[in-house]
């Protein structure tokens, strides 16, 4: 939830509580039978509502930055390369990064990789080193994957050294 949405939720909750308090504090309402016990109950509800809102905000704030949730937009740019230096030895050195919902991970075999080189992409080290279970990329080829985290990507190569380039792009 964005900061503006949190603020709006807080303000609207506060306004509703203030309006209820003002209505219940007026003599017109009290004359119709509102007693002190009911007023105390409403005050307790208002105080608990604020406490629950604070806890909800803490949970939402934890989701915005870590692996527990998927932020609606990114605060950083992710661009880099992975170098394979041992033939058919899987590596996973893309920094762990939560991929926002409106983006996908783009993987590209570097255009200057040797002719005949093939990068093998998979979700585990074992699958990256098995050409039957990995996605092959030839030089200058690109693949886009909708993943939740970059740590799900493993790469191996038949010829070394080779480079895998990666970045994030909007789904558009």
Image: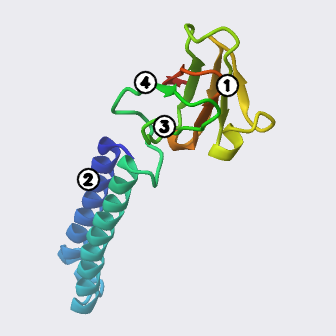
Q: Can you tell which quarter of the image residue 38 is in?
A: bottom left
Q: Quadrant of the C terminus?
A: top right
Q: Left of 98 or right of it: where is 119?
A: right
User: Of tags 1 and 4, which is closer to the observer?
Assistant: 1
Task: Give the class, few, some or many, for how many residues have Cα within 10 Å of label 4's Cα (few <14, many ≥20).
Answer: few
Could you say whether the residue bearing mark 1 is in a helix, strand or loop? Answer: loop
Q: Residue 140 carries which label?
A: none
Residue 27 image point, x, y percent: 18, 77
Q: Circle 3 sits on which residue?
A: 100
First in sequence, mark 3 or 2: give its number. 2
Could you say whether the residue bearing mark 3 is in a helix, strand or loop? Answer: loop
Q: Left of 93 or right of it: where is 113?
A: right
- Alpha carbon separation for disc pair 4 and 3: 17 Å
Q: Can you tell which quarter of the image residue 141 is in?
A: top right
User: Of tags 2 and 1, which is closer to the observer?
Assistant: 1
Residue at (58% x, 24% y) in the render? 107
């Amino acid at each position: 939830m964005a900061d503006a949405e949190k603020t709006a939720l807080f303000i609207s909750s506060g306004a509703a509580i203030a309006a209820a308090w003002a209505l219940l504090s007026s003599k017109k309402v009290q004359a119709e039978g509102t007693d002190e016990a009911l007023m105390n109950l409403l005050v307790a509800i208002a105080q608990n509502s604020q406490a629950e809102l604070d806890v909800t905000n803490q949970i939402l704030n934890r989701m915005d930055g870590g692996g527990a949730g998927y932020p609606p937009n990114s605060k950083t740019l992710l661009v880099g390369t992975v170098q394979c230096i041992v033939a058919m030895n899987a590596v996973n050195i893309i920094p762990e990064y939560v991929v926002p919902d409106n983006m996908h991970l783009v993987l590209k075999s570097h255009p200057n990789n040797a002719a005949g080189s093939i990068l093998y992409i998979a979700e585990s080290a074992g699958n990256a080193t098995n050409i039957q279970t990995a996605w092959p990329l030839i030089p200058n080829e690109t693949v886009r994957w909708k993943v939740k985290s970059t740590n799900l990507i493993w790469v191996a190569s038949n010829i070394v050294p080779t480079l895998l380039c990666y970045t994030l792009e909007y789904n558009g």
